[in-house]
Image (cartoon, rainbow, N blue to C red):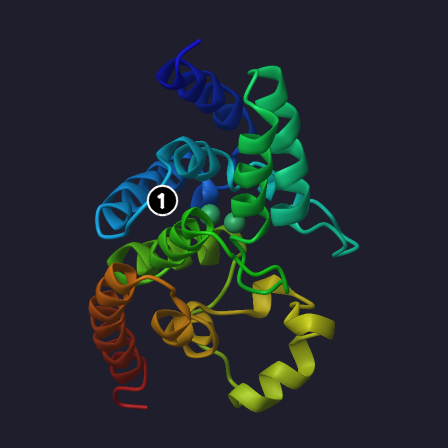
Amino acid sequence: MNAEMKHKKIIEIVKDKLTCSAHNLDHVFRVYNLCLLISKYEKNVDLEILLPAALLHDIARVEESGDKTGQIDHAVLGSDMAGEILRNLEYEKEKIKRIKHCIKTHRFRTGNIPNTIEAKILFDADKLDVIGATGIARTFMLAGQFGQRLTIDESLEDYLNSNTVENGRLKDVSKHTPFIEYELKFKKIPDKLYTKKAKEIGVQRLEFMEEYFNRLEEELTQGA
Ligand SMILES: [Fe+2]
Ligand SMILES: [Fe+2]
């Protein structure tokens, strides 16, 4: 089986696993395309590692969302699930190890740090998809899914004291808002990216996002 056929098989498997609106197959393909774009500006990128990793990176997302204990990390579980899928598709042992590393380290919050160029590109591509116009759309899709409001009535500090538990996890996701997500997370993204091209795109996307959220705040308090 050639690489293209293997990718098709992976897409079939991933399609059935991703049911969340913000982490569906469209997200996977956007990340895949951003990986291809960023890889053109970097040296010695092995697409045979990067592309399967991009396709498989969120395979355990649904397991994490459904886990009420907060123990499941979709990057860690996803890397194990991907290992199994790749073995069945007869990928070489060494390649599986490198693809698994990309998946395990694609996440912000964990201490697993990307240390190969492929893992860094996947990390960057995945983060770019949560900012800019796409990021705004995704965050409101999630807000709708969880019944969130546009604003909160308390200060950000009071909100954080009342709605977060260990490791910054939310107690009640329905009390969260896209605006808080922007303040706490999205603003910091460009600084955390590894590759030059991704940083460049990240800064542009964040500028647009900033304009949008400033305007939103202005409108929400107009006449108040
Ligand atoms: Fe992810
Ligand atoms: Fe992702």
Q: Quadrant of the C terminus?
A: bottom left
Examine the rendered structure and indicate whether residue 142 appears above or below residue 211: above
Cβ of mark 1 under 8 Å from ligand 2: the answer is yes
> From this viewpoint, which residue is outermost toward the right?
69
The quarter of the displayed image where residue 183 is located: bottom left
Percent x, y of residue 171: 69, 68
Seen in the picture, residue 72 relative to 205 is either above or below; the reply is above
The image position of residue 114, as x and y in percent, is 52, 57
Q: Residues within 10 Å of mark 1 (few under 14, many from 20)?
A: many
The residue indicated by pointer 1 is: 31
Res. 154 visible in picture: no
- Which residue does the image show at 66% across and 66% down from the upper left? 172
Give me the residue at 24% from left, 72% from top: 212
Residue farthest toward the top in the current orientation of the protein: 1
Q: Nearer the viewer, residue 3 or 167?
A: 3
**Residue 153 visible in image:** yes
Q: Is residue 207 left or right of residue 170?
A: left
Residue 99 position, x and y percent, is: 53, 38
Q: Quadrant of the N terminus?
A: top left
Question: Label 1 amino acid?
Answer: Val
Coordinates of residue 157 in the picture (x, y in percent): 57, 90
Q: Quadrant of residue 194?
A: bottom left
Mark 1: secondary structure = helix
Residue at horizontal 26 percent and vertical 84 percent from the top = 218
How many circles with numbers are drawn on the protein? 1
Tell me the residue at 63%/30% (across/down).
83
